[in-house]
Image (tube, helix red, strand yellow):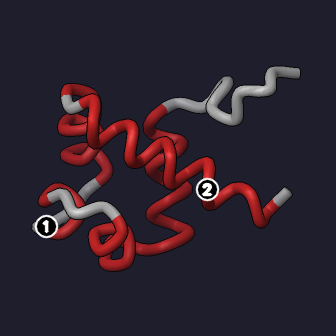
Amino acid sequence: MSADPLHGKTLEMILVFLVDFYGWEKLGSLIRINCFTDNPSISSSLKFLRKTDWARKKVEDLYIKSMEPLK
């Protein structure tokens, strides 16, 4: 088993988890990017996150932080 909490997780899986866990409104307040606040959707967010490394890192970091209490 990998020590990397992102091992085997796709960006889409991570994003769906975060949207289910927080909802778009809370997610948009935690990570201030327009694709979470202005007419959000999984597909538009994925498109943005796949080409924007700093935003993807914020999403991955929030996912890791969000998983800690669930262990």
> Percent position (x, y) of residue 51?
20, 26
Q: Quadrant of the C terminus?
A: bottom right
Where residue 31 appears, as percent x and y from the top left, is 31, 61
Give residue 8's mark.
none
Q: Dot 2 corresponds to which residue? A: 65
Q: Please report the residue visible at 50 percent of the width from the left and 54 percent of the height from the top.
A: 62
Left or right of 13? Residue 71 is: right
* Residue 50 position (above or below residue 63): above
Image coordinates for residue 34, horizontal then vertical, percent = 13, 59
Mark 1 neighbour class, 10 Å CA radius: few under 14, some 14 to 19, many 20 or more: few
Query: Can you say which quadrant of the picture contains the N terminus?
Result: top right
Q: Earlier in the sequence, mark 2 or mark 1?
A: 1
**Circle 2 Cα neighbour tier, 10 Å, few/some/many (<14 / 14–19 / ≥20):** few
On the image, which quarter does residue 36 sit in? bottom left
43, above or below 68, in the image? above
* Quadrant assignment, res 5: top right
Q: Name the element at disc 2.
A: helix
How many numbered discs, if any? 2
Q: Which residue is mark 1?
A: 39
Q: Position of residue 27 (x, y in %)?
A: 37, 68
Residue 52 left/right relative to 60? left
Residue at disc 1, secondary structure: loop
Tell me the CA gap for discs 2 and 1.
Answer: 25 Å
Amino acid type, mark 2: Lys
Eye-nearest disc, 2 or 1: 2
Position of residue 10 in the picture relative to residue 48 (left or right): right
Name the residue nearer the viewer: 54 or 28: 54
Question: Nearest the camera: 29 or 10?
Answer: 29
The structure residue drawn at horizontal position 38% and vertical position 47%, both measured from the top left corner, is: 58
